[in-house]
Every structure is written in C-alpha cells, then in structure tokens.
Amino acid sequence: MPTNLTEKFASSIVSVLGCHDRVIFKGYLPFGRDEHLNGWVDGCLKMRRMDFLPFVEKQSQTLVEHAQDQAAKAGVPYQRLEGQPRKEELVQRLLRESSVKEGLVTVLQVMETCRTVKLRHGQGRPRLFFARRPQRVLYYYFLDPEFGLMYVRLQTWFPFTIQVYVNGHDWLARQMQRRRLGFVQHDNAFTQLDKPAAAQRLAERFPKLRWVKILSRWARQVNPLLGTSWLGKADYYWVIDQAEYSTDVLFQNRAKLAELYPRLLDHALLHFSAQDILTFLGRRLHPRFDGEVLTDCKKDRLPGARIKHRMKNNWLKMYDKFGQILRIETVINQPREFKVRRCHLRQGRRQMVWCPMNKGVANFYRYHAVARAANERYLDALAVVDLPCATAKQVDRVSQPTKFRQRRRRGLNLLHPNEQRLFLAVLRGDGRLHGFRNRDLVQDLFGPAAVPADEKRRRSLRVCRHLQLLRAHGLIAKIPHSNRYHVTAKGEALMGSAVTLRVEAFPKALAAVA
C-alpha cells in the first residue's frame, strides 16, 4: 500500500520538487550588551560618551550618501518613501518599466523603528544603552546573477545591523539556466520541469553554499564603514533569521488538484492533533513542553485556501499555488526547538552530543534536514485521503455480528458517537505514520489524567476489546512482531467514510432543511 501521497496519486502528478523558498539572513556587529558598548567607547575609541551619538550621526549620513552615490552610478532611482509602502510592488513595477537585467535596481529609504543606541543621563557619568527608535533604513534591491531578485536592508544608525533576503527558487532557476535544463517559472514556483531529478539535485546544493563569504561580499558593497579605523577589524556575525523550505507537488491539471485539495484540507483539520504536528516536526509531546500548538484553516479564499499548523514560532503549512501545485511548507523561525549534533566538553572529554540548534549560518544544513523531513512526514500522513468510498455490501457486512478467535463479536453502528470517537482515535495522523498501541487509544479516549491502578487496568481492557472488535471486522491489523496496529484499506474506507458522513454530510443536510 502506498505510504506517501505522491506515490498514491502518481498517475495524476507530474513532478515533486523540494526547495528552499524565502530565506532571511541577519548580520550583527560585535556590540551585544550595554557594558561592552560603554567599555569599547571608553577604552578603544577614547571618546566621551556624550560625543558618541553626534559621531555616529555623521556615520549614518555617510551611509545615506554612499547609497545615493551607488544609485547615481548605476543610473537607477533613489527614493524616499513614507508610511508603510508596498516595496515589492514598487520594485516589480520598476523592473517592468526599466531595462535593468543585472545589478542594482533601486535604493529605497524608509523610516523604521529599529534597535540602536541612546544616552541616559543621571548620577555620575552618562551611560550608553541599546533601545529602539525610528531611524533611516536603506533597502538595496539587486538583480544578482546568481540569486535573482534579492535585497539588502541596512540600518543607518549604529550598530548598523544588516538583513539579506534571497529566494531559493530564483537561485535554482539560474542554476538550471546555466545547465540548459528546461523549466517554466511562475512567481516563486515551477509549473514545468523537463528534468525534475536533476533540478532536485541542484536544489540540494543551496544550503551548502559558502554563505559567510557571499553575505560578507554583499555587506561590504552597501556598508563602506567596514574596515574603517574606528571600527577596526569588526565584522558581521551572520545568522538565519527565517528559513522556508517547500515541497511542491505539481499536478497534471487544475481539475485533478481541485478534486483532491478540499479533502486534504478537511483531513488535516479534522485528524491532525497537536501530537501529530509535533511528530511531523520531529518532536515528541512531553509533559514539560512549554508552548502552544495551534491549527488555523482558511477556506474562504479560492484559489489559495490554506491550513497552517504552528508550534511556538515555527510553522507547517499546506496551500495550493495557481490551482495546480500543492505546496507543503515548513518555516523555521525558532531553531532552538530542534536539535543539532555539536562537539561539547563533557566530563573533561570532547564528544558529539545533541544540543538545541542556534541560528548560526553553520547550521543551515540542519535547517534543511529538519524542514525536508517535516514535509515528507506530512505527505505520508495525507496518504489516507481520497480512498475509495465504502460499498453498501461492506457497510452491511460490518453491521452484522462476526467471530474473532472463536468468540462472537457484535456488529458496528458506524454513525454512533461512541463508534465515531473510536474511529477518530484510530485514524489519527500519528497512528498512520508509526502504528498505534493500546496505551495510545487509552489516552485519546479517556484523556491523559492520572487514575488509580485499578481504573487504569479497566480502561486498558476496555480498549483491548475495542481493538479485538475492529480486528474481527477487518478494519485494523496487528503489525507482526510488535504490539502496534495499523489501519487496513477496508478500515480506511469504512471509518473514513463514516466520519466524513457524520461531520460533513449531516450538518449540510440539516442546514439545507433549515
């Protein structure tokens, strides 16, 4: 039986491509705390603290003048924007109207509230401290020969934090152009790939690029203060602020996806629990887990209906693009929720251990592995959707008593609330991935609350009888050499149809009558 949605619907699918989408890097100069800043101004610059702000104000003007000079040399507009402008739309319009094929497209200056330095007066010496305040921010938009349309965002006030945005799909498009691989790109997705396997091999190279060297080159292009005498050898430390990894399933035509997609949304909304979401992201539900796991589904926008699962500040999304691509996307904003193997000193010995993952660029390979695995698990769990509906003969048969190990077992009432609760527990996404045990159903049916040993045993025996009942009717089967069970094809058809009928058809019928 197919274990993955792409295997199950292979006849309707043209290609599958996993690729990084939006990636945002940030660069920080080594001025992290107030104490360090004040010591640096006193000891290295040998400057009065009250003179530091007028000094960095001049440096801010230097950055603005440099941006204006860069725009003038490239023959592109330097624009001052107010409010909250739609910068992407403005840049796209400039690209349509201009003949720029490579290099600087425009420089935009906007006012934004960012972290910078203030001076606090009081008893004793004045004190410099970091705080947020409005300042001029420069956006350099480039058509890079390697990465396509990208931007570098530079804060003009000390400590001159920098942000770089790139898109993995644009980078991949240029790699395929160089190798003369045919494709059709629409926005940030590919609606046609002549050689999907070759494209996938190229996409796997993206997190392995020499990112520190690439990012430092862009930083020196926009920040002429790097290398000046007062900054010395200070350079940016680069981190990954946000990384998106998408798996695009391209269908043959829109009708194929339109028939399947609503069922995928309903299945994810009805059956994927908080524990399932954690499982997809490679986590376990632990009593000490401190955070929220939420699911949000928007169906009122077609095309573009989507479901979004959030674990703290990390997301797992499913949506359709252009009515032809099913996209599963993992967005990592909070990497410390995941683990990475690092060399640590333990009991006097250096050894490789699993540690919380930080945002350093060196961990890009691990971002890639975590997100790709999450997308694959999600597609595995969706493989149960759109199975053949149960036949009238099957419904009649499970409604009649049967035998299991020479003992009589009652028939099933498929629409009874108690039976429905059992079906929902059995059809959970986590059980679809790894199978389920008696204890899993006990927790789903009765809750995780602690109970006396006698009551715990009674619940376990009751679930055992439920399992025997489902096995007697052929809805589940035991996994050999284990204490786990999996849902059979017959069980998926019957239980899935019964749940769909009660959850969807009944409310619609009642609404029509009303």
Image (cartoon, rainbow, N blue to C red):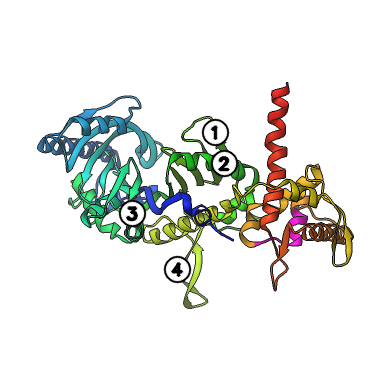
Could you classify mark 1 by the number of other residues whose Cα lies within 10 Å: few (under 14), some (14-19), or many (20 or more)? few
Tag 1 and tag 2, C-beta contact below 8 Å:
yes
Residue 112: percent from the left, percent from the top?
Answer: 34, 32
Q: What's the CA distance linking mark 1 and mark 4?
A: 43 Å
- Say if the magenta span includes residue 326: no
Query: Which residue is pictured at 73% across the width and 38% down the height?
Result: 502
The residue singled out by tag 3 in the image is 238
Residue 375: percent from the left, percent from the top?
Answer: 49, 53
Determine if residue 446 is in view.
no
Q: Amino acid at mark 3?
A: Trp
Between discs 2 and 3, the one toward the N terminus: 3
Mark 1 element type: loop
Instruction: Please give the range of residues in magenta.
Output: 435-443
Mark 2 element type: helix
Q: What's the CA distance linking mark 3 and mark 1?
A: 38 Å
- The answer to whether residue 458 is left or right of residue 354 is right
Could you classify mark 3 by the number of other residues whose Cα lies within 10 Å: few (under 14), some (14-19), or many (20 or more)? many
The residue singled out by tag 1 in the image is 299
Per the rendering, the mark at residue 342 is: 4
Residue 248: percent from the left, percent from the top?
Answer: 42, 49
Query: Which residue is pictured at 89% across the width and 64% down the height?
Result: 407
Between discs 1 and 2, the one toward the N terminus: 2
Per the rendering, the mark at residue 265 is: 2
Q: Nearer the viewer, mark 2 or mark 4?
A: 2
**In this picture, is 49 found above or below 76?**
below
Query: Which residue is pictured at 37% across the width and 53% down the height?
Result: 239
Closer-to-camera residue (290/98)? 98
